[in-house]
Image (tube, grey):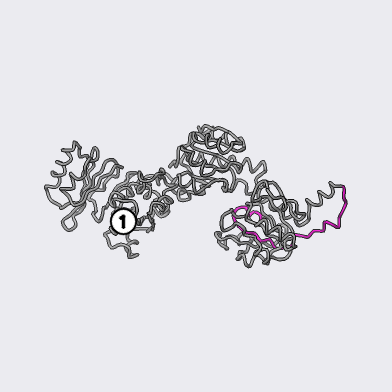
Amino acid sequence: MALATVRRILISDTVDPCCKQILQENGIDVTEKQNLSKDELIAEVKGYEGLIVRSATKVTADVIDAAENLKIIGRAGTGVDNVDVEAATKKGIIVMNTPSGNTTSAAELTCGMIVSLSRQIPQAVMSMKAGNWDRKKFMGAELYGKTLGIVGLGRIGKEVAIRMQSFGMKTVGYDPIIPPEVTATFGVEQMSLERLWPLCDYITVHTPLMPSTTGLLNDESFARCRKGVKVINCARGGIIDEAALLRALESGQCGGAGLDVFIDEPPKDWSLVNHPGVVSCPHLGANTKEAQIRCGRDIATQIVEMVQGKSLIGAVNAQVLTAAIAPESRPWIKLGEALGSVAKACAGQVKSQVQITTLGQSLKNAAGYMSAAVVVGLLKDGSKNAVNLVNALPLAKEAGVTVCCVSFKSFLNKIASHQSDAAPILAQSACEVEICANGVSHKVVGSVQGDVPVLLELNGGLFRQPVPLAGNLIFFKALANPQLVSSVAGVLAAAGLQMESFSTSAAIAGEQWCSVGVSSLLGDLNTLKVHVKEALQLFL
């Protein structure tokens, strides 16, 4: 399933030529314009469905608001802190990075920093170039037997650990996401930061920059560290508090720092760079020929495969769509949107509590995209932003919609969980949407037959024949009597409408739900309501 149509892409930073070549070979028109000012970028980006950047271009909320047709922002690299991901998400734009493109290069630079700090290699080089031969000044220390603390044990942290273990270093680490049993397989013992700080001779950080990691190494954490600890940051400027680092260097609490990144790039304050205990580089982590080729190739390939509906890799704000891209998911997504629309028509308003239940083995991994799909149906035509699977859940929160989703292997499992005492739905897989607004609940249940989304149940009424969820549909609840069909047909005929399909539910307490497919919707639904108890209509 193709998640977006992308015909034109703007590349606004210097990216390896293979990126443009791959995109063009797959029928995408590419324009390269580097060094654009913010105003120039705002003016230029309007005509493109895709934007590819490295770290120089700042894709701010203003840029995103101006990008009327943008569907994808591709970052040829790992970090996306130069992209306003929240603004992109609200507008339904996928933000994609290349998660493994610069892994090796960044890991190797980190290892080089560790070795340089242990033997003061850069300082000795500069001394030699100044005409000095000063062996005593540059007394170093072996890495063998020392402890390296790695904060962030993803791809880069793992590769650093493996390489530094070959020097005989003991590797310990911290990661709030990756389980300890996983990191143990590559030789890293996980522990809390409180335990890690005082154990380490060297500490390297490999986390994204976010509120929880900003200033992670600060005055307090430096005070807990072993005196003379050496720290390395080849990840993102700001993870280490630069002012605290300078104080720790000057007091001797920190014995040296290797910095490839800074809060401001280039730095506004060069105090750290000029400190004799600091080895610094101008953000070279991904600056290798191999990494640039890899990142350029990966971002182009990922975009092409997304457009072709083959896979979705590196989507930092649309993880729920990873499973949605499979061809077999498309009719279920259509079903979710249709059920959302029917539920909204029943409730008469958007602000509500919504519970989505997926039933069956084929929907075991569908909770994420089915929730998004149902919300698309709920919010369609009622949001200032175009609603899609990327922004549906954030927009639901803004609209006052509370969404909960649960999954069961079968309807019988749901009954066993005491969440339902209804008769089992006669479908191997199904989706149930229950919406509650102003204390009144409505429930719709649907499934997919062939590739066609169908309605199985509406507010307790189980349809004798599943209702295809397409076209102009009128639903009404009325007393079951032989005159009902002729009365409804008369209303439709008087409005100049043709009845194209008709289905009824089993009667409950003498009442039944009916579904009518019509050539167009009624101009005034009240003409029908005089004959029935409840009525709603919608176009799908």
- State which quadrant residue 169 falls in: bottom right
Q: x, y (%) of residue 427? A: 31, 53
Q: x, y (%) of residue 532? A: 17, 50
**Residue sitting at x 16%, y 41%:** 491
**Residue sitting at x 62%, y 56%:** 239
Q: x, y (%) of residue 261? A: 66, 50
Residue 139 seen by the camera: yes
Q: Is residue 144 found inside the magenta-colored segment of the image?
A: yes
> 293 or 49, which is in the foreground?
49
Q: Is residue 199 above or below residue 109?
A: below
Q: x, y (%) of residue 133? A: 88, 51
- State which quadrant residue 57 falls in: top right
> 497 or 399, which is in the foreground?
399
Check disc 1: other Cα within 10 Å, few if <14, some if 14-19, many if 20+. Answer: some
Q: Is residue 10 above or below residue 480?
A: above
Q: Secondary structure at mark 1?
A: strand
Q: Which residues are magenta?
A: 131-160
Q: From the image, which quarter does the N terminus lie in?
A: top left
Locate residue 244 relative to residue 334 in the image: left or right: right
Q: From the image, which quarter does the C terminus lie in?
A: top left
Residue 306 seen by the camera: no
**Residue sitting at x 53%, y 39%:** 51
Q: Residue furthest left?
A: 483
Locate residue 369 relative to residue 8 in the image: left or right: left
The residue indicated by pointer 1 is 437
Q: Is residue 138 found inside the magenta-colored segment of the image?
A: yes
Q: Is residue 47 above or below residue 515?
A: above
Q: Amino acid at mark 1?
A: Ala
Label total for image: 1
Q: Is residue 506 above or below residue 228?
A: above
